[in-house]
Amino acid sequence: MNPPSRTDFVSLTLTGQGSGIYNNNKQWRRQSCWRKWKLLSRLQRNLILFTVALMLVCGIATNPSVTEHFRGLAVVAKEEGDHALKPAIHEVQPELDKLNRPLVPESPSEKQKRAAHKRGPPGLQNRLQKKGNVSDTQVEKEEGENWRVAMIDQATERRTAKEAANKVDVPEVEQEGHSHKEPEVDRLEAVRDAFRHAWKGYKEFAWGKDELRPMSKSYGEWFGLGLTLIDALDTMWILNLKKEFEEAKTWVSTELSFDKDVDVNLFESTIRILGGLLSTYHLTGDTLFLDKAKDIGTRLMPAFNTPSKIPYSDVNIGKGTAHPPRWTSDSTVAEVTSIQLEFRELSRLTQDTRYQAAVDEVMQKVHKLEGKQDGLVPMFINTNSGQFTHLGMFTLGARADSYYEYLLKQWIQGGKKETALLEDYLQALEGVKKNLLKKSSPNRLTFVGELSHGRFSPKMDHLVCFLPGTLALGAHHGLPAEHMELAKQLMETCYQMYAQMETGLSPEIVHFNMHEGSIGDVDVKLADRHNLLRPETVESLFYLYRFTKDRKYRDWGWEILQNFNKYTKVSTGGYTSINNVRDPEYPSPRDKMESFFLGETLKYFYLLFSDDPELLSLDKYVFNTEAHPLPIWPTAQ
């Protein structure tokens, strides 16, 4: 069978669109390419797209003009530092307001129920002056709106709180053959930032006034003497805030006058104004502050013109008269025994002995008085008879707290020569151990309660948290080592008063559970849930860290500072006291920044985070109860 004939050529017929002629125009080529693209699989198409994209990126990256541009951006970002990363309340998008639930302002009845607890005589009213003619309704509305923005900022800060925490054990990172450590968060700068924010509100809305009301952007007057500004002078110097210090110094030089027909509280004026001016003089050497200190100290002296030489609580610094509170002839024991450091130092600087003689006579009388129980003193003393009143009531909280603090600190200030002061201090500590020191349930926290006519109450004021620091200070100056052990136990308790609250901020007063089977150690009554930005716990953390170098005290302080920023920072400047530390959604701002927040709380934060043991060495300085450092006298004196 013969094979089929072989064909040596192929015949191909091309048909054009709409005609029998081949068409090679651009439109035809585009359509032909699209058909070929569609015939490719999805994988093939993706590979082609990825290759094209990669070539484009490589081309851009190797372009010299582009690389120079990005290198410049990196330099700018490095120079700006953390400032570009810190969230600012006023920059939060307005749309986020919709995420916050409506805020209900306090009713007038609720405001009347609140009793603002201050150091000093009970019932002393803070004379508040609103900025302009703003009605209460308008103020409440503005408070709510400000707090809404503040809560937005809190939400932002919560997301980055852990990232912002100081890195204790920072891992080493390998990069291009070199190892390095990530930089720690600058906690000192965080304190400066907090101060600047508080100062911003004070400067803008309350300059030269006693206290800032940050929510209503106004101010409150108590004595009309610029309490916040004077209280903050030495803090600004210690924090090296030169610009702010010079602003305040100019006001003191040109505006501060004590020639005013105004009643002031002897205790509060002594620890805040006299103490603040004296410490600023010592830190700066500027006699402006010593002259002002001598002026106010002299104007306070009429308080000691009483039958018993126990001073009245109130002095009119313009008229030169003094009187007890309208409701009683008593002064509190803390008031009359916590002015000694300041008046003694004023005598040493001016060589005028009358200041020290007046306060030393008070201590000598109290030393001999009957009515104590194992060294513990009652809360009140009568200015006419010079005797204790309200016998049988003993506390280390309000109205008695700083009596015990100043026993130790006067002994240290005077070169450890005045043995009667040390004896009273040591006896009082034994009385605390015997009568007031107990353990809570279930975690056996050591706490200091109160005694009323033989009945123990597990009530502890936040003010009592000065005690761990005072105990540690005594141990540092040669008192028994067991004082330091007790200080550590009480420090743990004071920290737990913060940690066990939903906001991480301590209430003003807690009650400890002592019954077996209790679920939690701490109960807080509705009326006691407020936080006034108090310094006592931070103060004790500073002492404990300075003497032990245990980093946990710093870390506890850092937690507290972060929570102040979360729940009390106001967007337009300043920090506010809050009513409810158990409600993180709406802590209920009080619209008040106490002067001691700048004078004490932020100062102790800064000292806690500082690595310089010579920054206000505790072998050279003793702090008054408002955190104003005064020098320890030379031993030759």
Image: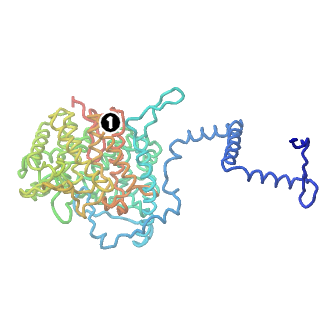
Outermost front residue: 1
Q: Quadrant of the C terminus?
A: top left
The image shows residue 155 at horizontal and vertical percentages of 43, 56
The image shows residue 599 at horizontal and vertical percentages of 34, 48
For the point 25% across and 52% down, the residue is 497
For the point 49% across and 66% down, the residue is 98
Q: Is residue 527 visible?
A: yes
User: Foreground residue, 133 or 446?
Assistant: 446
Q: Residues within 10 Å of mark 1 (few under 14, many from 20)?
A: some
- In this picture, residue 72 sits left or right of residue 204: right
For the point 13% across and 48% down, the residue is 437
**Could you tell me the amino acid type at mark 1?**
Leu
For the point 45% across and 32% down, the residue is 181
Residue 165 in the image: above or below residue 388: above
User: Foreground residue, 74 or 382?
Assistant: 74
Figure label count: 1
State the colouring used for the structure image: rainbow
Q: Quadrant of residue 349?
A: top left
Q: Quadrant of residue 348?
A: top left
User: Foreground residue, 259 or 398?
Assistant: 398
- In this picture, residue 487 sits left or right of residue 252: left
- Secondary structure found at label 1: loop
Outermost top residue: 177
Q: Is residue 297 visible?
A: no
The image shows residue 487 at horizontal and vertical percentages of 20, 41
The residue under label 1 is 616
Residue 209 in the image: above or below residue 467: below
User: Foreground residue, 504 or 32?
Assistant: 32
Q: Quadrant of the N terminus?
A: top right
The image shows residue 9 at horizontal and vertical percentages of 91, 43
